[in-house]
Image (cartoon, rainbow, N blue to C red):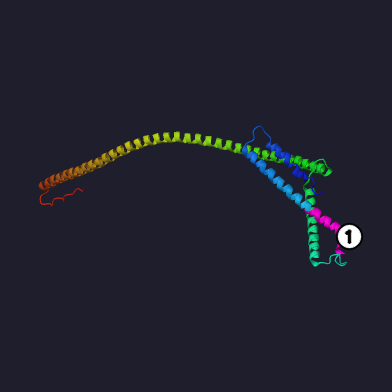
Amino acid sequence: PLFRRPPAHLACGRPLIGAMSGGAAPDAELQRKVEEYRARERVYLAGLMGQEANMVCLRSMASDVLGAYGDGSRAALRSALCYPTANMEVLILRQKIRDRDQQITLLKEELEANRFDQKSKDGQALMKKVKALLCENRELGEEMREERMGELKAALQAEQRDNAQWYNKVNEGAEFCKELSEENVKLQGTIAKVAGRLREARAENEGLVKERSELKKKRKIEKEAKAVAAALVADSTATMADEGAGGGGGGKNPPRRRVASG
């Protein structure tokens, strides 16, 4: 037939557009888009019908040639196409037909490759494989999540233990610092007392040194005074002895006077 039914992927577009256009109160923008889609669909269908008409004409011409002359490749040898212009046009048309047939074959192969039927054997096998892969993926995800959670829990527990140890060490350090500060305060008080006593001892020592120096000076003066007194007494005694000896001894020489050593 000249005009065939449109393909399934085009025939299903009209209910989709009807579903899009259906509604209680469609707005103007949606209605305009629906009209544009419908116009495009009509243009596309018209182009397809024109191409199919051309294909029908070309096929009819090819069938006529084959029916009249048998083998179309030997028609020129049997003087079937005696005019060169017509011969070239027929060859061009044949080439177009071969190209169009190849294009149709490729489109059919692509359509078969892209078509997916869930109820077919291949579709059911593919769905089973997909379900198995999804189940395996879910199991792997759960295993990885459990392993990751176990690692994170172990790391968290280790961090908590470390934090507890550091917290205890910090508390011990704080207590030690508190004790040190208390002992420091006590030591500062003791140092202040010792410094006061040291100042008192130094003052007392200075007083004792002064007293000692004064006593030394006093003793030295007393010793000098005693020596002078002893020397005076000795001189007076010697003088008296010399005088007594001079009166009683006549012309004898008087004894020499003894000088008292200091």
At which x and y percent is residue 167?
Answer: 55, 36
- 114 up-or-down from 16: above or below: below
Q: Quadrant of residue 19?
A: top right
Q: Is 141 placed left or right of 195 in the picture?
A: right
Look at the image and tell me whether residue 209 can be seen. yes
Q: Position of residue 118 (x, y in %)?
A: 80, 41
Give the answer, above or below, for where 31 lies relative to 57: above
Label 1 secondary element: helix
Name which residue lies at 73% across and 39% down: 15
Image location of residue 159, percent across then percent down: 60, 38
Q: Is residue 59 magenta?
A: yes
Closest to the observer: 98 or 52? Answer: 52
In the image, is residue 76 above or below residue 97?
below
Looking at the image, which is closer to me, 46 or 142?
46
Task: Determine the residue positioned at 11% across, 46% down.
Answer: 243
Residue drawn at 75 percent across, 50 percent down: 48
Q: Which residue is mark 1?
A: 68
Q: 238 above or below 97?
A: above
Could you tell me the amino acid type at mark 1? Answer: Ala
Can residue 105 be seen here? The reply is: no
- Tell me which segment is drawn in magenta: 54-74
